[in-house]
Image (tube, rainbow, N blue to C red):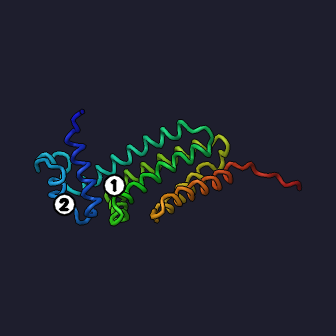
Amino acid sequence: MPKVPSSQLVLDAAYRCFCRNGYRRTTVSDIVEEAQLSRPTVYKYVGSKEEAIVKVVGSLLERAAAASDAAAGTAATPEEKVLAVLAVKLEVAIRLWQDSPAHAQELLSAATAQAPGLVTAYTDHLAGLLTSALAPAAADGARQAAAVLLTFTRGLEDDLRDTDAVRGELLAGVRMITRGALARPVSIPG
């Protein structure tokens, strides 16, 4: 079994602490205890809880972006690509809500506050994937449709108590929005 690098042990411990205690109540001492590493080792990788959440968020979003790229690359139609990309985004939020039902909203707010550049870069990356998926069939409205789809998905992430229902809403919403964006304008005889 390969040895897990200390940096990953620290990030995993920080994630577990944030999920268990929330962002505000987590301390670096909690992370040290959870990681079962020395304080100097933990400080080598995260000097503060602010740095810890930035690195945790960065790692999560990096993996999510790669998964979105892969999902978009394997889907055949524009609608399937859009659904695949947004399903990955939704699953990241679902995982957070499952790992930390009591603190998920606080963690999302802390992530946005402490790592706004990372969150913006991730959202921009998804917007680019969605725009690329829609552009061949809806060049004029692809960017706007991508923005609407991202806003719609963010709205779904607000209440994830019934994940099956939310996944169904994502499918229905993606179908409605993409079909509207991909519909050819009808010329009206004058």
Residue at (42, 52) in percent of width and height: 92
Residue at (49, 47) in percent of width and height: 126
Which is more N-terminal, label 2 or label 1? 2
- Please tell me whether mark 1 sits on a helix, a strand or a loop: loop
C-beta proximity under 8 Å, tags 1 and 2: no
Is residue 151 visible in the rendered image? The answer is no
Apparent side of residue 72 relative to residue 8 in the rendered image (left or right): right
Apparent side of residue 26 relative to residue 65 in the rendered image (left or right): left
Q: Residue 27 carries which label?
A: 2
Q: Nearer the viewer, residue 158 or 164?
A: 164
Apparent side of residue 139 relative to residue 7 in the rendered image (left or right): right
Q: In which quarter of the image is the N terminus?
A: top left
- Please tell me whether mark 2 sits on a helix, a strand or a loop: loop
Q: Which amino acid, mark 2?
A: Thr
| Among the 4 quarters of the image, the one containing residue 9 | top left
Residue at (58, 50) in percent of width and height: 143
Q: Quadrant of the C terminus?
A: bottom right
Question: Given this view, does label 1 or label 2 mark the residue nearer the observer?
Answer: 2
Q: In this view, does 52 lie above or below 101?
A: above
* Residue 75 on image: x %, y %: 57, 39
Report how many numbered discs are placed on residues in the image: 2
* Residue 170 on image: x %, y %: 56, 56
Q: Which amino acid, mark 1?
A: Ala
Is residue 100 visible in the rendered image? The answer is yes
Farthest residue to the right: give it: 190
Residue at (52, 43) in percent of width and height: 129
Crowding near pointer 2: few (<14 within 10 Å), some, many (20+)? some
* Residue 100 on image: x %, y %: 33, 60
The residue where tag 1 is placed is 115
Crowding near pointer 1: few (<14 within 10 Å), some, many (20+)? some
| Among the 4 quarters of the image, the one containing residue 161 | bottom left
Q: How far apart are marks 1 and 2 (CA)?
A: 18 Å
